[in-house]
Amino acid sequence: MKAVLLRLACLLMMAGWGVGARAADVAPHRVNVVLDWFLNADHAALLAAQYSGSFARHGLEVHLIAPADPGAAPRMVAAGQADLAVSYQTQLGMLSEQGIPLVRVGTLIDTPLNALIAAGDIHSLADLKGKAIGISLAGADDAVLGTMLSTAGVAMADIHQVNVNFQLEQALMSHSVDAVMGAVRTYELIDLKLKGMRVTAFYPEEHGVPLNDELVFLAARDHIRDPWVRAFMAALEEGTNTLLNHPDDILSHAIADHPELDTPLNRAAWTQTLPRVAKQPALLNTRRYRAFTAFLHAHGVISHEAALETYAVDPFLLTP
């Protein structure tokens, strides 16, 4: 481990060469980032930006906060208790409709991670007719599930929907339900297989649901033009590149700081999550965002399609 950390220290030193040292008398700008969940492989780019010195080189002192409530992050930013929230694109339309002044300013994971996971002898979506399916979040999950089932000729009235809160894996393992909607393919799916369960995963984007970003950064609308937002996204892009070049070194450093990450599940999740990390975090795919908002509107999750710039921006394209 010492050898690995020494190699990483050399890497981090080299990463700082040629960037331009920040004046010693300029205090870094503190940025509090509330995560969507406990620290895990989804946050690898954030850890890499910390360990590579990217945040520091851009004049930022970044603090990562794991919330007690998985749904707390947007509320904390809206209340001024944090600067950025890691949240979900699927929630953006609903937040906007509720009048919560939050705007997407970047992306952490730019592919879907949610999946419909079934246990036992269910091998096709058609096999779910008459079965019990657990969900966590009404609204977007309903729209996604209904769309997926419809591609196999199964209606929502043909299944038994059960709200299992965020206990998706436990509900499936206890046989309380036959399948769960919204489980993460790079976490719960891996864990279920490691625990010996026979499961089948169905992916929304392969069954009629538009592609979307899984995890995004939300900032208060009044702060989206602040210089620290652009500095954060530039640093994150640099950190992501370091992560892709040296994933094992970043993981070793993360495990040294967070020993709870040193499990077969987290190591497997780290490997499977890397290809899904946004390479250009600030970049906004306007076509995809509009398509997903239209999808939510068509399925009654939101009552109208708000103008894109009211809920999602590329901070580098904004005038100061």
Image (cartoon, rainbow, N blue to C red):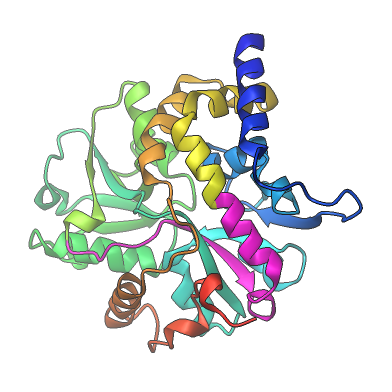
Q: Position of residue 123 (x, y in %)?
A: 12, 40
Which residue is more in the foreground, 278 or 10? Answer: 10
Placement of 272 over or under 238, stated as above or below = above
Q: Which quadrant would the N terminus be assigned to in this image?
A: top right
Q: Is residue 291 visible?
A: yes
Left or right position of 97 against 24: left
Q: What residue is at 27 percent from the left and 81 percent from the top?
A: 298
Q: What residue is at 30 percent from the left and 74 percent from the top?
A: 287
Placement of 311 over or under 91, stated as above or below = below
Residue 227 is inside the magenta segment: yes
Quadrant assignment, res 162? bottom left
Q: Position of residue 94 (x, y in %)?
A: 47, 76
Left or right position of 72 against 263: right
Q: Is residue 38 visible?
A: no
Placement of 28 over or under 170, stated as above or below = below
Look at the image and give the residue range highlighted in magenta. Answer: 208-236
Q: Position of residue 251 (x, y in %)?
A: 54, 27
Left or right position of 217 against 278: right
Q: Position of residue 11 (x, y in %)?
A: 60, 27
Q: What residue is at 19 percent from the left and 60 percent from the top?
A: 148
Placement of 197 over or under 308, stated as above or below = above
Residue at the extreme right of the image, as rendered: 25
Q: Which quadrant would the C terminus be assigned to in this image?
A: bottom right
Residue 160 is inside the magenta segment: no
Left or right position of 131 against 237: left
Q: What residue is at 66 percent from the left and 38 percent from the top?
A: 16
Which residue is more in the foreground, 242 or 90? Answer: 242
